[in-house]
Amino acid sequence: MLKKKPVFYTKLSGAVILLLLLIYGCGDSSQSNQHTSWRDYGGGPDQSKYVIEDDITKDNVNQLEVAWTYPMGDSRVYQWNPIIIDTVMYVLAKNSSLVALNTKTGKEIWIHANLRGIASRGINYWESKDKKDRRLLFQMNNYLQAIDAATGKSILTFGKNGLVDLKEGLGYDPETVSRAQSNTPGKVFENLLLLGGAPGENYVSTAGHLRAYDVVTGKLAWTFHTVPQPGEFGYDTWPKDAYKYIGGVNTWGEITVDEKRGIAYYPLGSPTYDYYGGDRIGSNLFGNCILALDARTGKRLWHFQTVHHDLWDYDLAAAPQLITVDHDGKKVDAVAVASKTGFLFVLNRETGEPLWPIEEKPVMQSDIPGEQSWPTQPFPTVVPPFNRQKITSADVNPYFLSDSERKEWKTRLDTVPTGLFVPVSMKRETFSIPGAVGGASWGSTAAIPDKGIVFVRSVDYPSVYGKVVKISPPSAEEKAAKERVSGGRSIYTTTCQVCHGADKKGGVGPELLTLKSKLNVKEFQFLVNNGKGEMPAFATLKEDDIKNLYDYITSNTPYNYRLFGAPGNMKVTGPVVDSGGAPGGLNQRVVKGPAASFSFGLEYGIPYPDGIDAPSDRYFIPPGWGLAFPYIVSPPWSTITAYDLNTGTVKWQIPIGTDKEAAKLGGKNTGMLRAQRQSMIVTSTGVLFCTGKDGKIYAFDVDNGKELWSYELPTGTEGIPSMYEINGKHYIVVCASSPFKFGRGDEKAAAEAPSSSSTPETSKGSYIVFSLPDKK
């Protein structure tokens, strides 16, 4: 057994701390000079979403009006955080095209069309000291690319003819890596782009190593192994060969940078597989850690693990908030980390030491064979949680449920253990809250850095897991069949997909979903080799290849390659200067090896590498990831919590929004179900802006949470809003393109009351810009 004492945080030596104090000074406030513009995702390097301004105040915020709008021109749902450089705003619209807009009028300056596969939440900006080289850096289709911020054209001197392959440099054969990029854009620090990744969440996924790239050349500057390799710190918290097959431990969320100290703070996710750890006995560093690295070198400075040996998918994703607080009679620079568990961890920014005690408490242990769940988990003792962490029969929703359903849920909740660290089981179902997608996620945090005030926007979204299922290794015959389908998929992608579609539903050519009912394998072979009508002959394909192709087309295996954006044949109008990014960036790359034949669901998945001592059986939660019943819990479903971290107390907490279907039943201030993708802006004048799942943007008083203003958008909104200034006047821009969803939102509700979804046409999607009226 490897149940060693977990390492929560690592202190820097006294000499190093003294050096830091000499360089930076005691109690140096967060970098206030970065809070006057919105040049980064999240507002700036510190991700505080804090803006210093004197234009929009508590007294006049109710006078905000729409200054201009920019229609997105398609039916996509966007989650984009616009960035603003001088008088230019960069947005994603028009079938995933990057568009440069005039910040005062919304007029198009240039369009780089058809960037399908681009990271969907934002983009990075960098400029040289002389400002002659200004570039936009982004991930797309598992490549890193750069665009000239002035002209909108791809920079082909970056990487290899404009492309840096993110599948390379991870320690795997790039052709076997299915996913590498995250939808979150990373962070620019000096001449480096700091990146996390989203490699997948199943057995034998790719590890989420952290990397930094030169913004000019695209060269890899450093790599930090989040699953430690032999000789590296944390290696002894895993089985000896874990680094060869354990995946995840990745930053798919938001990176925060302390520019003055040169420290980058990474919130890390759980190891794979999320819900079973029999093949990863130990505390599993750096899973679920807040990790502080030297941003220039990638050297570990300290870490703090928020969940040991995670069995609940309790990733860290929200931006760590850099604050300065009065603590024990002195100024302390701290970092506050909000989690899916509902805990807010407050640590010394330089050492990782908790400002208040964090206790290890015994938690329920797993009953799954081979599992060795960690006996304790960390619980903050002073700072209260921002979410519910237990669900009982008293918490069953008074809305949306029939009497019989309500009775059933109460009975189920009374008969099984529920709570934050209750592991899934083969013997019973499991209820977990805030849940695997509850608590705090990307876009969920903001701060007033120099006052030690942190805001957390969160959601109660219970996870309801059925009994765990055991899957044994496939037989040789099953394995061979899977490999045939994998080979057929590769052939289909390169020879058939352009005409018949990635989903086999047809396009230029007919659909192929019913092929098995029309042709047997011999007839299909004749057709492929000889062609028919407009279909060309593929005479060079061998008999075995054609059989594999037939097996793939007639199987139910989904094609798991996805690009963000509609098909590229949509015509984009306007000042288009380029299309598709760098040459080859849109090419669909076929995954080879075991990963190619794997799809989500109850199947064994990718085998372990040869020679690995790991359990032969695997355990899975039933399909659906426990996300089917968010509506069983009573409101409020989404809230903002304001913390004063000078004292470790909650200043106030309020629900965000009201569900229209609940309101018809008498509900008030209910918050919104599934409100995971909205965000905030906080101003120096004491106004907190927040977007709501109910399709409104709100303004609140930062001191007490009182609502000062709201505006109902034409569609729902996702992503982080932005704030910018022109000649002393401030503007707020909101990305609004998502459909509304009120009520319980499942198939039963849709069948019984279709109006409960209240879904507008998302073709109305637009970027909406607000400002105060011009002074007369």
Image (cartoon, grey):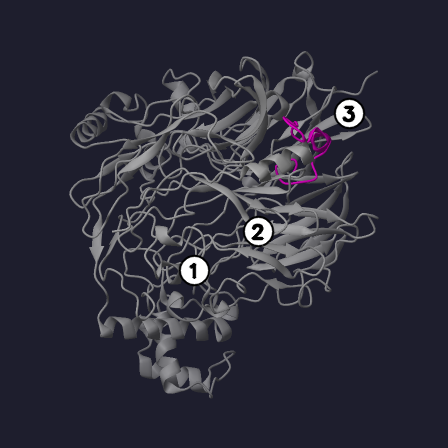
Q: Nearer the viewer, residue 395 or 425?
A: 425
Q: Main secondary structure of the magenta part?
A: loop
Q: Nearer the viewer, residue 646 or 443?
A: 646
Between tags 1 and 2, which lies in front? 2
Q: Which residues are magenta?
A: 25-44
Residue beneath disc 3? 729
> What residue type is disc 3 on?
Lys
Residue beneath disc 2? 298
> What residue type is disc 2 on?
Gly
Q: Quadrant of the C terminus?
A: top right
Classify 209 as above or below 633.
Answer: below
Q: Are marks 2 and 3 in contact (CB under 8 Å)?
A: no
Q: Between marks 1 and 2, how big is the CA–CA gap?
A: 33 Å
Circle 2: element type: loop
Determine the residue positioned at 39% across, 65% down.
Answer: 595
* Mark 1 or mark 2, earlier in chain: 2
Residue beneath disc 1? 560
Q: Are marks 3 and 1 in contact (CB under 8 Å)?
A: no
Q: Between marks 3 and 1, how big is the CA–CA gap?
A: 46 Å
Dividing the picture into quadrants, the one containing residue 326 is top right
- The image position of residue 232, as x and y in percent, is 45, 55
Tag shown at residue 340 = none
Q: Name the side, left or right, on which 436 lies relative to 225.
A: left
Q: Name the side, left or right, on which 547 lies relative to 40.
A: left
On whether residue 29 falls in the magenta region, the answer is yes
